[in-house]
Every structure is written in structure tokens, then in C-alpha cells.
Image (tube, grey):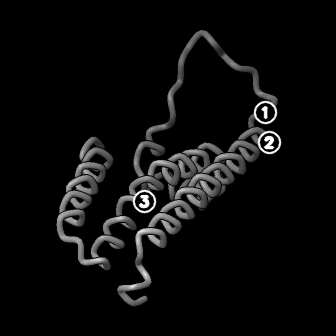
Amino acid sequence: MTRSDWSDRRVERSVGNLLRVGVILAGCVVLAGGMIFLVAHGSERADYRAFLGEPSDLRRVTGIVRGAIARRGRAIIQLGLLLLIATPIARVALAMFGFAEERDGMYVFFTGIVLVILLYSLVGSA
């Protein structure tokens, strides 16, 4: 795309489409994971006396991806939640790309700071 293709309106439209597709995709993945989980575990009785959190392998991205490839419901649900978290991060990255194409250095700088903060809060807390 040429520089003139990245007008403000084009960036806004692209960002809106990215957010829409990201949220819909994340919702579909969570729904699919929930259905797989219910098919496998729907008839089990719930034990409300003890709280059992997610398995330890679902606390890392690699474990989530491995579990999703193995078609485990919980892992697919977690993958959908990761997609939902990644959507606004991708939005900031796309906005930064749009500002770079428009050669707007100040907005690239500030958007880059926001992107670094978002990535640090996601990766740095793991």
C-alpha cells in the first residue's frame, strides 16, 4: 500500500475490523472448547467442597497450544481467552503501523510505549 492508502479513515476501519474479527474468533474458539469440554465432562458431578484451579500445563502458552492441538476442551477455552487478550495488543500494533505509514513520528513513539507496556504486562507477569 502506498502512503496515501493509510488515511485516518482507513486506519480506523482496519482497526475496527481487526477488533471485530478478533473478538468473534476468540468467542468461537471458547464456544468450541466449551462444547468439547461438556461432551467429555458434562455428566460428571461437581465437587463444591474443594476448589481445583486450572491444571499447571494450562498456565503457559506452550501447554495451552499443545493441549489445543490434542483437542482438550480446557486448553481450547484458554486459547480463546489468549486470543481475546491478544486482540487489543494487535490493535495497538496495527495502529502503530498505520502511524508509521503516515510518517507520524510522535504517534509512533507513544503507541510504541503503549505496546511495550502491554507486552510487558502480558509476558513479564508470567
- Disc number placed over residue 39 in the picture, else none: 2
**Residue at 51% over, 58% down:** 65
- Inter-mark Cα distance, 2 to 3: 34 Å
Q: Amino acid at mark 2?
A: Val
Left or right: residue 66 compared with residue 118: right
Quarter holding the N terminus? bottom left
Q: Nearer the viewer, mark 2 or mark 3?
A: 3
Quarter holding the C terminus? top left
Q: Secondary structure at mark 1?
A: loop
Are dots 2 and 3 in contact, CB under 8 Å? Answer: no
Q: Which residue is mark 3?
A: 91
Between discs 2 and 3, the one toward the N terminus? 2
Between discs 1 and 3, the one toward the N terminus? 1
Q: Which residue is mark 1?
A: 42
- Inter-mark Cα distance, 1 to 3: 36 Å
Provide residue 71's location: percent of width, then percent of height: 66, 56
Rendering quarter of residue 98: bottom left
Provide residue 84's location: percent of width, then percent of height: 52, 49
Q: Is residue 33 above or below residue 69?
A: above
Extreme-bottom residue of the structure: 2
Are dots 2 and 1 in contact, CB under 8 Å? Answer: yes
Q: Nearer the viewer, mark 1 or mark 3?
A: 3
